[in-house]
Image (spheres, grey):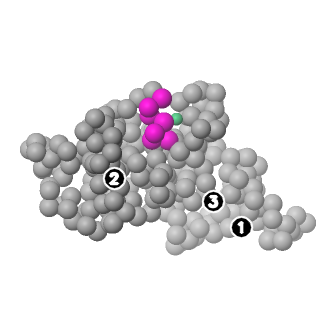
């Protein structure tokens, strides 16, 4: 077993080392470093993630043990977990930190499916919070950029003006040069008006909202690690 201390209160998670290391190379590299963790030591190997939210880490562990993510539903308290029962955006960012495209892809699928089923879009406050933490050219960045572009293009309808007031879109874009650059790039390219509503893109086209790349396994193909649901 290994001990992982999470968040400012150092919440303890005692985890099966084999399971953790089999799924996440980050942890196998860490715990198999014999300088830091001598194999003949009697102490339980311990690492700390002081900046990670314990609830996000718990979702990560449920994936380690169960191979899938829990159902994602709107939170009654819209201020919690970016409006969801667990913070799918933070799980995605944790996937980036630990270099786990499989987890990122599952988070993306969960988010798109839940947004589709519950008729939700990203709140502008969520975009402002999440976007700066994303790596360039990742699937979540593309998804948020496409979603925002669609909302801007539809801003002449009353519904969208209520949800995404023009003034707040301007403030959101003005606060983040990278986001502004991305949206302008999408405006100029083929990804503008002809683009499908990103929540409803299915089949192989949906892989534009995945991070598995050409050599990786798509969670929707069934034979991948993530597809081994029982
Ligand atoms: Zn895919």
213 or 53, nearer to the observer? 213
Q: Residues within 10 Å of mark 3 (few under 14, many from 20)?
A: some
Q: Position of residue 181 (x, y in %)?
A: 33, 59
Q: Residues within 10 Å of mark 1 (few under 14, many from 20)?
A: some
Return the disc, 2 or 3, that comes first in the chain's sequence: 3
35 part of magenta stretch: no
Identify whether 37 is placed above or below 70: below
Q: Main secondary structure of the magenta part?
A: helix
Q: Position of residue 101 (x, y in %)?
A: 58, 47
Return the disc, 1 or 2, that comes first in the chain's sequence: 1
Considering the image in quadrants, where does the C terminus appear? top right
User: Hey, which quadrant is residue 174 in on the image?
Assistant: bottom left
Q: Position of residue 167 (x, y in %)?
A: 14, 61
In the image as oriented, which residue stretches furthest toward the right? 40
Q: Is mark 1 within 8 Å of ligand 1?
A: no
In the image, the segment drawn in magenta is 204-210
Viewed as shown, does residue 49 lie left or right of 107? Answer: right
From the image, tell me which residue sits under label 3: 13
């Amino acid at each position: 077993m290994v001990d992982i201390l999470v968040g400012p209160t150092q919440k303890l998670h005692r985890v099966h080392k084999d399971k953790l290391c089999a799924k996440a190379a980050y942890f196998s590299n860490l715990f198999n470093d014999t300088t830091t963790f001598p194999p003949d030591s009697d102490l339980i190997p311990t690492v700390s993630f002081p900046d990670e939210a314990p609830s996000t880490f718990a979702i990560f562990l449920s994936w380690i043990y169960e191979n899938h993510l829990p159902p994602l539903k709107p939170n009654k308290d819209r201020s919690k977990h970016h409006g969801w029962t667990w913070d799918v955006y933070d799980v995605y960012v944790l996937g980036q930190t630990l270099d786990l495209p499989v987890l990122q892809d599952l988070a993306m699928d969960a988010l798109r499916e839940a947004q589709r089923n519950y008729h939700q879009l990203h709140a502008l406050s969520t975009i402002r919070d999440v976007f700066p933490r994303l790596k360039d050219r990742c699937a979540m960045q593309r998804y948020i950029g496409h979603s925002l572009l669609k909302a801007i293009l539809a801003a002449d309808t009353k519904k969208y003006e209520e949800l995404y007031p023009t003034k707040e879109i301007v403030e959101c874009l003005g606060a983040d040069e990278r986001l502004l650059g991305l949206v302008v790039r999408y405006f100029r390219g083929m990804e503008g008006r002809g683009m499908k509503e990103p929540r409803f893109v299915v089949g192989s086209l949906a892989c534009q909202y995945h991070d598995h790349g050409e050599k990786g396994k798509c969670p929707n193909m069934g034979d991948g690690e993530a597809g081994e649901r029982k």
